Amino acid sequence: MRNYYHFVIFVSIMDFQVTFKVNDKIYLRDPESTEVGREIVKNAIDLVYELGFEQFTFKKLAAEIGSTEATIYRYFENKHRLLLYILNWYWNYMEFLVDYTLTNIKDNKERLKLIVKLLTHELPESTGKFDYNKKNLNAIVIAESSKVYLVKEVSEINKDQVFKPYKDLCAKIATVISAYNPKYKYPKSLSTTLIEASHHQQYFSLNLPRLTDATPKNRAEFTGQFLEDLLFKALS
Amino acid sequence: MRNYYHFVIFVSIMDFQVTFKVNDKIYLRDPESTEVGREIVKNAIDLVYELGFEQFTFKKLAAEIGSTEATIYRYFENKHRLLLYILNWYWNYMEFLVDYTLTNIKDNKERLKLIVKLLTHELPESTGKFDYNKKNLNAIVIAESSKVYLVKEVSEINKDQVFKPYKDLCAKIATVISAYNPKYKYPKSLSTTLIEASHHQQYFSLNLPRLTDATPKNRAEFTGQFLEDLLFKALS
DNA sequence: TATTATTGATAGTAATACTATCATTTATCA
DNA sequence: TGATAAATGATAGTATTACTATCAATAATA
């Protein structure tokens, strides 16, 4: 029954028009402010999913939306910034989902279980036409997200606070961890380990299955169980 | 005293001439077989460290070793393969270190502790002139290793068994995990989580410290403690 | 010493990652 | 509504990257 209950929560989210203001240092022109801008982001998600970040170019994206490179460069300095934009959106959305899902849930164990579920399962798909493809977004988060910070210039770009949504999400989860077990010494490290391990385990189960105990079919469910087990034992 | 003991082990390793045969599908011409080849790999490690993998090019590497792009292309198809070569070497070396370090250690708890130490601390520096710079190699593993498998063509390149050393290392650690607690359900996932978390936590502590509970100064020691705590609680 | 393998030098190509210009279209607001 | 400004599309151009090809010079080997 609990599963069904969550599903209802997810469905109800779709009825909202959930939007986030992404840090304006990430873009040159706000892509939310125009039709072309929204098309850029929406199609970027699909194209990065299709091609992988390395093969993805602004030229190909321009062709996809029937525009030109020049137009896209007016919105984003380069493709790295565009990926950063997408992930900022995702981290904001995930933090919203955590907040929303934990509303009125008092029990800290239950709160942590819900967090693990959110981190390991696909984002709720919405019906709105101009919404992002959540399946593709989810795949991008799993396969490409670490590429936004595993770059030589990380300290430089970090100055613009572009990783704040990730840090906020991490801090939020760490807070629940500390509420559950105030004596636990590594709440933030455990929090990022949950997030990153969720990506890795799912990626491995899909692409390098000998690196996990999962099978590609049950990857989300398996990863959830593995992380829940790990989390509660760590906090015992 | 135990720390000193490990140090002695490391020193004694340096007296061996440890070499590994890396899967010959990774290179076009074996870089171990010639002086130029060895210079390519040695200088690649230093240059990837300096520039980051994205800014690293064969042209720059050629300039570094006083050679030309053409020569490097005769050894490696592209820079991705060269990085793969470096990581294969590292994974082989790490597996050797695990084997070597665990020799004659019967107690499974002690064995796991030694593994965590190996995964989180820098590789033993050697004195040989033609050896790789282990500090730089360590930094590359932390910052760049996931880029060898987080690519669209992962399934294609996986067919050449180029990830076998990583899988072998993972399997070896999983074996010790299972020996310590035969009932534990996720030995391989826990193994890769230890490896990947070691990289992430150290990277974060250096570059995005709010994502961990560590400080840049104690990163290896901190990461070791965090992972040891996590590991033994998971297996309790 | 002859043969072969390897390297260095040079050149060239297609694609990438941009920047610049300008005419046209679209939005704003007086 | 018409004038003004902003955004876009079309086109062109540059430096760099990621290669491939050719060939003479050098080094290794038999």
Image (cartoon, coloured by chain):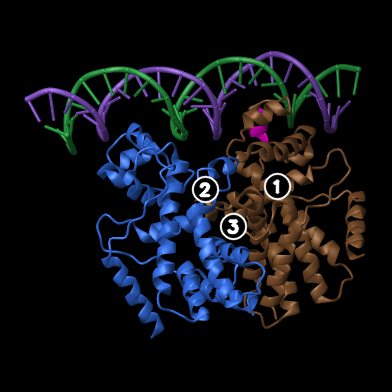
Chain colours: A brown, B blue, C purple, D green
Instruction: State the SS at label 3.
Output: helix
Task: Tell me whether marks 1 and 3 sit on the same chain.
Answer: yes
Instruction: Answer left or right for C13 relative to A140.
Output: left
Seen at 76% across and 50% down, the residue is A21
The overriding secondary structure of the stretch rendered in magenta is helix
> In the image shown, does B83 or B115 lie closer to the viewer?
B115
Query: Circle 1 sits in a helix, a strand or a loop, which is it?
Result: helix
Discs 3/2, front = 3
Q: Which residue lies under the disc numbered 2?
A: B148
Give above or below for D20 relative to A40: above
Q: Indicate the amino acid at tag 3.
A: Leu
Foreground: C28 or A35?
A35
Position of the N terminus of chain B by quadrant: bottom left
Q: Do the residues bearing badges 1 and 2 touch, measured as CB atoms within 8 Å? A: no
- The location of residue B41, given as percent across then percent down, is 35, 47
User: Residue at coordinates 77% horizontally, 37% vertically from top-left?
Assistant: A38
Q: Which mark is residue A113?
A: none
Residue B3, given in percent of the width and then of the height, sits at: 40, 80
- Residue A35: image location, x then y, percent: 80, 33
- The residue at the point 88 percent across, 62 percent down is A3
Task: Tell me the quadrant of the picture where the C terminus of chain B can be found.
Answer: bottom right
Mark seen at residue A139: 1
Same chain letter for marks 1 and 2: no
For label 3, the residue is A211
Vertical placement of B82 versus A211: above or below?
A: above
Q: Residue furthest bottom?
A: B1
Q: Amino acid at mark 2?
A: Val
The Cα–Cα distance between marks 1 and 2, rounded to whole angstroms, is 18 Å
Q: Which residues are magenta?
A: A70-75
Circle 2 packing at 10 Å, graded few (<14), some (14-19), many (20+), is some
- The alpha-carbon separation of the residues under discs 3 and 2 comes to 15 Å
